[in-house]
Image (cartoon, helix red, strand yellow):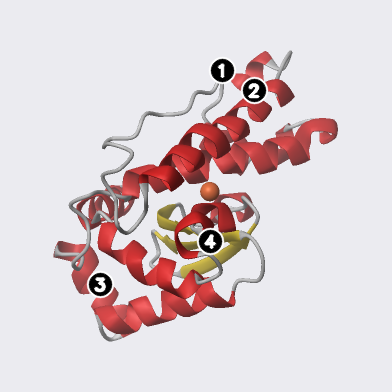
Amino acid sequence: MFTVPELGYEYGALAPHISEDIMRLHHDKHHVAYVTKLNAALEGQDELASRDVVDLLRHLDDVPESIRTAVRNNGGGHYNHSLFWQVLSPNGGGQPQGTLGETLIQKYGSYEAFTEKFNAAALSLFGSGWVWLTSELEIVSSPNQDSPLLDGGAEPLLGLDVWEHAYYLDYKNKRDDYVAAWWNVVDWGFVSGRYDAAQAE
Ligand SMILES: [Fe+2]
């Protein structure tokens, strides 16, 4: 059985960038719904249900066709949101330090150039989806609850949820204001740790 991880901070801790109301709705309703539906889809599939969610998403061909879409959408929702809560912190913001910070600047020219490109991907994504920074430091957009994991791609270091449920209560239709505020709560220490771990593999 998959379970929703607890937040590592209070629901209101990311305010004013992300409100307590959004965090309660997003974590306790949306994420819980993905996990409930994932568990329901995998009922009677003991071997698949015993795998970790990355393994499931990387090997969707192993999942019977009758439940593959449910596992893709709800397993994706579970993985994506589990990562999302962890990349956020009330002590976030600033710029990445260490190897990740240096390598991002080498690749994009500056930290600002990187965020501009990432923001452009978030604003041009039509409908619901995610924008990722992968362990190869590529910026990738995915529709719905997809991620680079599905295409055998590099594991995401950081993901931005641009579904309206992530921001509509606070920002209404102003996705650009949400994206700008979101950088203030990104935990670069956590993201750098993921980068260093991926490099060590
Ligand atoms: Fe979400």
How much space separates mark 4 and mark 2, taking CA atoms? 25 Å
Amino acid identity at mark 3: Thr
How much space separates mark 1 and mark 4, taking CA atoms? 27 Å
How much space separates mark 3 and mark 1, taking CA atoms? 38 Å
How much space separates mark 3 and mark 4, taking CA atoms? 26 Å
Tell whether label 2 touches label 1 (CB within 8 Å): yes
- How packed mark 4 is, by other alpha carbons closer than 10 Å (few <14, some 14-19, many 20 or more), is many
Tell whether label 4 touches label 3 (CB within 8 Å): no
Looking at the rendered structure, the secondary structure element under dot 3 is helix
How much space separates mark 2 and mark 3, taking CA atoms? 39 Å
Amino acid identity at mark 2: Asn
The residue depicted at 65 percent of the width and 55 percent of the height is 144
The residue depicted at 62 percent of the width and 52 percent of the height is 146
The residue depicted at 30 percent of the width and 43 percent of the height is 12
Amino acid identity at mark 4: Val
Looking at the rendered structure, the secondary structure element under dot 2 is helix
Residue 162, label in figure? 4
Spot occupied by residue 142 in the image (x, y as percentages of width and height): 60, 61
Residue 39, label in figure? 2
Quick check: 41 above or below 23? above
Task: Kindly report which numbered mark, 4 or 2, lies closer to the viewer in this rendering.
Answer: 4
